Image (cartoon, grey):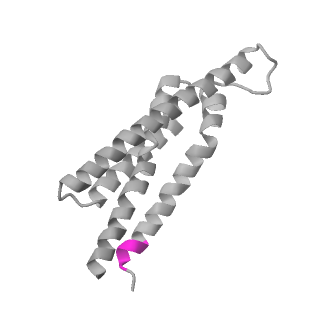
Amino acid sequence: GMPRLLYHLAFVQCLVWIGNTAWTYYGAQWFANSVYDGDQHAPEGSAAYENYGAGMNAFSLGGQLRSGLQLISALVIIAILLGTPLRPRYIYGPCIYVGAVVSLLAAFAVGHSGVFAIICWTGSIMPETGSFAIPFGLVATLNKRAE
């Protein structure tokens, strides 16, 4: 007798983490090879080799900004959950949509724009942040109801 909500949540979590995994494992490669048109195997000093380094630097900067956004957004999510009667799914849904939009923009609109790539990379943290903050609150609520 688990509530249907938990099955739905498990399915959504799986989809969110498929996206998170793709961003995490291939983000640096995307920056260096696709956005900056670099090549780590190019001769040292060549444009492709320098572009690869620039892509890795942009990836690192984006990762730092991503961490900052995750910290701030997690605190905002917790404050909203504690301070308002808003249901958790109304917070988690927008987090997922932000991730979907920036992923589509990264795939089809970034091109070779390093700044836009950093913005997309930074925004892609929102589904992960929601997936950490929201489900545990839902499970705690369901457990409290079951008592």
Q: Which residues are magenta?
A: 3-7
* Quarter the C terminus occupies: bottom left
> Any magenta on residue 4?
yes
Would residue 50 appear left or right of 10 to someone viewing this image? Answer: right
The percent position of residue 28, horizontal first and vertical second, equals 62, 35
The dominant secondary structure in magenta is helix
* Quarter the N terminus occupies: bottom left
Instruction: Classify residue 93 by image quadrant.
Output: bottom left
Q: Is residue 32 above or below residue 43?
A: below
Looking at the image, can residue 120 be seen? no
The percent position of residue 37, horizontal first and vertical second, equals 66, 25
At horizontal 53% and vertical 50% (from top left) the residue drawn is 20
- Pick the residue in front: 24 or 142: 142
- Pick the residue in front: 100 or 140: 140
At horizontal 40% and vertical 37% (from top left) the residue drawn is 69
Q: Is residue 120 above or below residue 4?
A: above
The percent position of residue 135, horizontal first and vertical second, equals 38, 62
At horizontal 17% and vertical 59% (from top left) the residue drawn is 85
Would residue 81 appear left or right of 59 to someone viewing this image? Answer: left
- Pick the residue in front: 46 or 61: 61
Would residue 2 appear left or right of 46 to someone viewing this image? Answer: left
> Any magenta on residue 81?
no
Instruction: Classify residue 5 by image quadrant.
Output: bottom left
